[in-house]
Image (cartoon, rainbow, N blue to C red):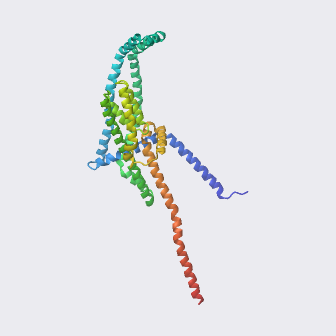
Amino acid sequence: MNLPAAAPRTVVRTVLIIVAVAISLYVIYLLRQPLKWLFIAAFLAMALSGPVNLLSRKMKRGFAITIVYLLLLTLPFLLAALFVPPLVTEANNLAGNLPGYAQQLTDFVNSNSTLASIESNFDVTERIEQAASTLPSRLESGAAVLSGIGLGLVNSVVALLTILVLCAFMLGGGRRWVDGALALAPPERAERLDRVLDRIGNAVGNYVGGALIVALIAGLLSFIVLLILGVPFAGPLAVIVGLFALIPLVGATIAALIVGVFTLFHDFPTATIVWAAWAIVYQQFENHVIQPQIQRRAVDVPPFVVLVAVIFGSTLFGLLGAIIAIPAAASIRIALREFYVLRTTEAELPATAAGAEQPDGGSDSAADEEARDSGAD
């Protein structure tokens, strides 16, 4: 059986395509870390483009980017100044007062006959006193662990600086980058791509703005509730609630549990019960009233897609991936919808053209028949 002459060339072309795809995937795997940085920088640039564009109306774009960056970089230092001093002070106070707490527990156990019998069998209070006496030394070792964590954070500075530099270039280029890329495409396709990119940029910017508003509302209301309950560190705890509110699906629950632990040490169980009731009521109010009103025009993503996007985003990029998962899913949905419209339009064009040509063909046939009849006469 003889193969067609084009068969060997088809096989070679198929093999070359497979090899090219395999090499491309391998290169992407090798560059996965820089590509991750590039993706994060692009998202950050879209998120910061709103305030940068607003400030650039009154000043040069470079100054606007500098101001936004300064505000962005001072945020971690403000959070550290807010959290670290009170936490260190309370940890030292706890370490110093814990032996006294253990002695009070021992006296209470000895005054109760049932607990005293348990104590004589298991020697619980002596073990608690030993643990309390060794707590300061354990705190020192814990400080060493924290220093190791700090070293790991320092090693991540390179990634952070790279992302910020990439984001600065994207912000500085503005529309020039987009216009330069669109100039390479045909006019009709360039117009469609420009529309898609504008919609994606608006979706990301609106989502970030809405998420910040939701976080601000959650933090302020939590601060008021904690002040009413008299819980210590109401300010830092409210900041924790606001920051965790940026994490989709699980952030508010995690923040409520963290604050709930602090309420255990102040007016238990009243403060804990009130806080738990408030957290449940507010989460329902946020999910059914605040979120739909603020994010309704920003993203239009079904709940199932949100869940899948958060799982995939957290797996690929960790905590940051969970935060950017929803706008990324909205962007993909916009692109797929536009692609579907494009394919549908292209599929309808040949049918429309064929229907338009059919009457012309019939007229030509009638004219030819008339000409033949005239010639016969």
Q: Front-most of 267 and 246?
A: 267
Point out residue 221 in the picture as x, y percentages from the top left corner: 32, 36
Q: Quadrant of the C terminus?
A: bottom right
In this view, the residue farthest toward the bottom is 377
User: So how many labels did they put on this image?
Assistant: 0
Q: Quadrant of residue 9?
A: bottom right
In this view, the residue farthest toward the front is 113
Q: Front-most of 360 and 286?
A: 286
Q: Front-most of 9 and 314?
A: 314
Q: Quadrant of the N terminus?
A: bottom right
Instruction: Give me the residue at 62% from left, 52% from top.
Output: 12
In this view, the residue farthest toward the top is 120
Point out residue 76 in the picture as x, y percentages from the top left corner: 34, 34
Task: Check the image and report above or below for 145 versus 256.
Answer: above
Q: Quadrant of residue 126?
A: top left
Point out residue 222 in the picture as x, y percentages from the top left corner: 33, 34
Q: Residue 298 vs residue 32: left or right?
A: left
Task: Check the image and report above or below for 371 versus 124.
Answer: below
In this view, the residue farthest toward the right is 1
Task: Check the image and report above or below for 6 versus 108.
Answer: below
Instruction: Give me the residue at 41% from left, 36% from top.
Output: 251
Point out residue 13 in the picture as x, y percentages from the top left corner: 60, 53
Task: Check the image and report above or below for 146 versus 54.
Answer: above
